[in-house]
């Protein structure tokens, strides 16, 4: 019996020291790191929406021309805020039962509480009755560092921080000038970055600004 026990112990010791065991441990560490990155990404709201759209939009989504006629959760849009053009991300869409008397009533009154949440709504649907919860993008420099305010000379990227200097707020859909297309920045040099974006088509913003400045095309 004792000989058998010693033999079993020797087998256990030899297994821990084998190349196979070391390879197994290396694989476990790699998977652990991979799963940690997935968990971190899954906690990112914008990442979740991009993933969901990728899996559910194929073959069922409207064509590109129609997308401009609707506002959807997680769309990127352009606003005119305090004499500046600002990028924003839609976090929620509410159809209110009646138009509020002024913008303050949207949040202070019952307009939002009595409204209906929508995933998608026409851009020109029911003027005065559609409120959108917007998170404003902030500006970042070429290294990804945060910049204060807008139209900074050192501006390079758009940042969508979880904790922002600008509190989330509801806006009437008429405040939105239109859609813009942004794409995520994965790396700056060899460094991985998160929640940084750049314009896919600079003409989106330029065309909207020109239209806003010259509403009659003059």
Image (cartoon, grey):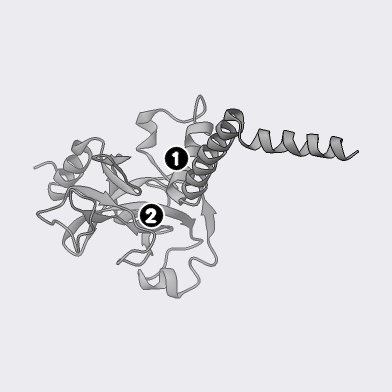
Q: Name the quarter where the N terminus is drawn.
A: top right
Name the residue furthest bottom: 108
Could one spot residue 141 in this view of the protein? yes
**Residue 46 pos. (x, y %):** 43, 48
**Element under label 2?**
loop
Residue 127, numbered circle? 2
Residue 185 showing in the rendered view: no
> Within 10 Å of the Cα at label 1, are there few (<14), some (14-19), or many (20+) other Cα atoms?
few
Q: Residue at x 49, y 43 (%)?
A: 33
Residue 6 as seen in the image, left or right of residue 24: right
Residue farthest toward the front in the current orientation of the protein: 3
Residue 150: give x, y in percent of width and height. 17, 59
Q: Nearer the viewer, residue 152 or 80?
A: 152
Asked if 44 appears above or below 199 in the picture, the reply is: below
**Residue 133: image location, x then y, percent:** 41, 59
Q: Is residue 168 above or below residue 198?
A: below
Residue receiving disc 1: 50
Task: Count the marks.
Answer: 2
């Amino acid at each position: 019996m004792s000989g058998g026990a010693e033999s079993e112990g020797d087998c256990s010791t030899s297994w821990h020291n084998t190349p196979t065991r070391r390879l197994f441990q290396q694989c476990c560490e790699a998977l652990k790191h991979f799963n940690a990155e997935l968990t971190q990404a899954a906690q990112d709201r914008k990442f979740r929406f991009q993933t969901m759209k990728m899996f559910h939009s194929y073959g069922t989504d409207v064509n590109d021309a129609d997308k401009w006629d609707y506002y959807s959760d997680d769309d990127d849009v352009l606003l005119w805020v305090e004499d500046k053009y600002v990028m924003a991300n839609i976090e929620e869409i509410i159809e209110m039962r009646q138009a509020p008397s002024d913008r303050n009533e949207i949040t202070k009154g019952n307009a939002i509480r009595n409204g209906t949440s929508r995933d998608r709504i026409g851009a020109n649907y029911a003027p005065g009755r559609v409120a959108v919860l917007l998170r404003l993008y902030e500006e970042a420099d070429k290294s990804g560092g945060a910049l204060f305010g807008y139209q900074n000379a050192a501006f390079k990227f758009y940042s969508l921080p979880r904790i922002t200097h600008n509190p989330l707020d509801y806006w009437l859909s008429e405040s939105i000038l239109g859609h813009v297309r942004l794409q995520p920045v994965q790396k700056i040099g060899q460094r991985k970055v998160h929640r940084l974006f750049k314009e896919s088509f600079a003409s989106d913003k330029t065309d909207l600004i020109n239209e806003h400045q010259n509403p009659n095309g003059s």
